[in-house]
Image (cartoon, coloured by chain):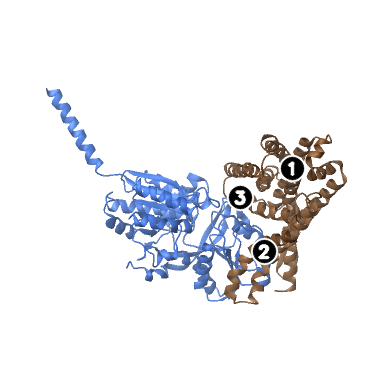
């Protein structure tokens, strides 16, 4: 009898404790990136950054049981929409994080935010979503595209570079980046060169640059096209004759291929591996130890996104059902960003520093970008005024 | 626009044309002689470039890696022929397209697995790292002159091979009518295998030559493949001479189009409209050229005899 009641007591205790912990559902976050598309180096670097942060957090956001679903949108908008819908409707994720390409993110935006699921972008920072199409469920943890490019334009003004030649591939991101540069640059634009998307040989464009003799050259060319362009520019002896400014062209995803040909060239970015704050020093050291390569801004933004989510989950004690509370916690940005000072604007896009960075070779033989000047300290984007969130 | 710039763009166009010739010569041989559509030709160009990357890294010498790529690509061509292509010579063109398309995907993924997906670089060989001054402030790498030289040498070599050797005569005969040639007792299967091997070798060689100036990434052959098809269709399928003339034409039209389309349009319309239409028109220029040529000469500029 005593044994039976002891057993019943143990069983009751067991049932009660399991039902108590079952009440706290695991936090469910999906990380979606364009892993299997062309020019997918940035996607892999972003995923590595997020995975590193997750590892440092012991696999848990806010100390709560966490389930992370890793997805690949293949760089295709229709695949992204299908997978986002599945994540929202079947898996009931609390947040979808990631994205590499702007057009893919824009396609997936509506299904995600309409279902009141949080969308944290670790790369695309499209201006429509910063302005009229802002959503209380969308956060850009990375940057706003106009400012990322505009910092080069502002630097060109400050350095009194009065003529500029612009070049980018002929697609939306290229046009957006050149638009961002033009918005802040006050000098004379001698030419805007939109190249075919898969062009490999830039000798004719290089010749036009030589003929135009601009004081500044602004380049937006992510991936292999940028590697080709910079190499050929250098081989033509032009890299020293103009001030080379860029965005996403000489970053850590391209430097392993560019190597010495990129040394001394400038870019504009919101982060560089040499930023001097404790969180960044730890991040870069741990990242290189884990993966063996220098992290890029894709990795840094994804790492920050994970830390941001961790801080927000901690603030709501793992209760993801109260979306307003979670949003408020996210908006507080109460985490140590690798970018140093970081906060969110009313449109949930970052207010942060935008630096002039320079490609350099480290003493250990690896290449990185180094922040040389804080061109726009704690800058928010101009679209926030068009956003209805105040 | 100035005269020096125009002359520089002419040179750039010629150099692009020569590189295109290197890529399309093999393709026109295979298509012309065997009637076999080989979409994987661009992927073979890619494999040649990646082999150059590894061999240059291992041997430290670009020249040595170039010499080693020849037999490597020849063997690869023979291997592909034995394993895959010989079963498709008599099949429908669509089947050939499907199987070679599958080969592109396989080769792209293989390259991704072996070398990774990040863009890679091959340094210009030290002997050719100098440059000449083309115009004020513009240097032209000596290596690009080497590419032009190599392309012209290959053109001459192929021309001699095809017109003055027995094997070349058989290739030309095979391009005209393969069945009759087989009926006359020639080992047509052996001939096809040889042509395929040489075609793969040419594709690989062009990949090696292009590697120091272009970034290596999986799928790098796709852009050249399309251009190569434009070249061989414009020039006449199966004709080396046609491929040479057409590739120079395509190279010139593409380069001059991209350089001056916007400027020319600015003469007749507003600057912003020209800026939008110019790049689009420039991208279309070579296809407009191809369409125009085919309109007047449906079999291309220099069709192989018996095909007009």
Q: From the image, tell me which residue sits under label 2.
A: B285
Separation of marks 2 and 3 at Cα, in angstroms: 26 Å
Q: Is residue A7 above or below residue A268?
A: above
Which residue in the rendered view is the most extreme toward the right? B164
Residue A252, image x and y in percent? Answer: 54, 54
- State which tag comes first along the sequence, 2 or 3: 3
* Mark 3 or mark 1, whichever is nearer to me: 1
Kindly identify which numbered label has been placed on residue B34: 1
The residue tagged with tag 2: helix, strand or loop?
helix
- State which tag comes first along the sequence, 1 or 2: 1
The residue tagged with tag 1: helix, strand or loop?
helix
Q: Is residue A185 above or below residue B100?
A: below
Number of numbered callouts drawn:
3
Q: From the image, tell me which residue sits under label 3.
A: B217
Chain for numbered disc 3: B
* Mark 2 or mark 3, whichever is nearer to me: 2
Q: Nearer the viewer, residue A386 or B266?
A: B266
Q: Can residue A161 be seen?
A: no
Q: Which chain is brown?
A: B
- State which tag comes first along the sequence, 3 or 1: 1
């Amino acid at each position: 009898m005593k044994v039976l009641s002891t057993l019943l007591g143990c069983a009751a205790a067991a049932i009660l404790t399991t039902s108590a912990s079952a009440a706290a559902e695991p936090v469910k976050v999906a990380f979606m990136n364009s892993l299997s598309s062309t020019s997918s180096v940035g996607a892999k670097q972003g995923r590595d950054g997020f995975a590193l942060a997750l590892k440092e957090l012991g696999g848990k956001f806010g100390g709560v049981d966490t389930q992370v679903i890793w997805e690949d949108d293949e760089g295709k908008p229709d695949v992204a929409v299908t997978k986002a819908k599945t994540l929202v409707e079947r898996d009931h994720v609390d947040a979808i994080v990631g994205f590499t390409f702007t057009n893919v993110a824009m396609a997936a935006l509506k299904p995600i935010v309409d279902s009141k699921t949080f969308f944290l972008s670790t790369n695309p920072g499209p201006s429509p979503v910063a302005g009229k199409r802002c959503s209380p469920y969308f956060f850009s943890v990375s940057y706003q595209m106009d400012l990322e490019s505009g910092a080069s334009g502002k630097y060109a003004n400050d350095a009194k570079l009065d003529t500029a030649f612009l070049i980018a591939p002929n697609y939306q991101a290229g046009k957006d980046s050149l638009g961002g540069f033009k918005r802040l640059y006050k000098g004379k634009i001698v030419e805007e060169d939109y190249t075919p998307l898969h062009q490999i040989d830039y000798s004719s464009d290089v010749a036009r640059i030589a003929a135009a003799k601009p004081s500044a050259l602004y380049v937006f060319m992510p991936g292999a096209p940028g590697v080709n362009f910079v190499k050929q520019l250098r081989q033509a002896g032009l890299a020293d004759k103009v001030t080379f400014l860029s965005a996403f062209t000489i970053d850590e995803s391209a430097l392993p291929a560019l190597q010495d040909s990129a040394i001394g060239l400038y870019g504009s970015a919101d982060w560089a591996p040499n930023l001097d704050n404790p969180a960044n020093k730890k991040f870069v050291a741990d990242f290189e130890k884990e993966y063996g390569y220098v992290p890029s801004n894709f990795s840094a933004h994804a790492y920050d996104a994970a830390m941001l989510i961790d801080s927000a989950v901690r603030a709501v004690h793992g209760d993801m059902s109260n979306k307003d509370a979670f949003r408020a916690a996210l908006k507080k940005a109460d985490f140590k960003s690798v970018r140093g000072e970081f906060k969110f604007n009313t449109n949930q896009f970052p207010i942060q520093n935008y630096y002039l960075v320079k490609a350099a070779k480290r003493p250990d033989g690896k290449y990185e970008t180094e922040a040389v000047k804080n061109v726009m300290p704690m800058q928010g984007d101009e679209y926030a005024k068009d956003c209805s969130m105040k | 626009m100035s005269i020096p710039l125009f002359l520089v763009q002419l040179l750039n166009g010629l150099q692009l044309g020569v590189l295109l010739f290197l890529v399309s010569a093999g393709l026109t041989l295979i298509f012309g002689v065997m009637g076999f559509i080989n979409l994987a030709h661009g992927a073979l160009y890619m494999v040649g470039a990646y082999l150059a990357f590894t061999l240059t890294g291992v041997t430290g010498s670009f020249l040595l890696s170039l010499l080693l790529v020849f037999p490597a690509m020849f063997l690869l061509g023979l291997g592909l022929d034995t394993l895959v292509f010989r079963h498709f010579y008599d099949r429908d063109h669509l089947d050939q397209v499907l199987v070679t398309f599958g080969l592109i995907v396989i080769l792209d993924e293989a390259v991704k697995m072996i070398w990774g997906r990040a863009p890679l670089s091959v340094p210009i060989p030290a002997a050719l790292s100098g440059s000449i001054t083309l115009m004020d402030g513009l240097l032209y790498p000596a290596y690009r002159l080497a590419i032009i030289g190599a392309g012209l040498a290959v053109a001459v070599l192929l021309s001699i091979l095809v017109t003055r050797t027995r094997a070349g005569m058989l290739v030309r005969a095979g391009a005209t009518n393969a069945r009759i040639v087989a009926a006359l007792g020639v080992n047509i299967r052996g001939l096809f295998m040889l042509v395929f091997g040489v075609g793969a070798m040419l594709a690989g060689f062009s990949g090696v030559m292009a590697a120091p100036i272009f970034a290596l990434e999986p799928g790098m052959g796709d852009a050249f493949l399309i251009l190569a098809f434009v070249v061989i269709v414009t020039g006449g399928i199966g004709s080396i001479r046609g491929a040479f003339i057409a590739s120079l034409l395509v190279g010139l039209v593409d380069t001059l189009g991209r350089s001056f389309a916007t400027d020319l349009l600015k003469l007749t319309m507003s600057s912003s409209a020209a800026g939008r239409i110019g790049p689009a028109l420039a991208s279309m220029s070579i296809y407009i050229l191809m369409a125009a040529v085919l309109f007047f000469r449906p079999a291309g500029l220099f069709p192989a005899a018996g095909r007009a």
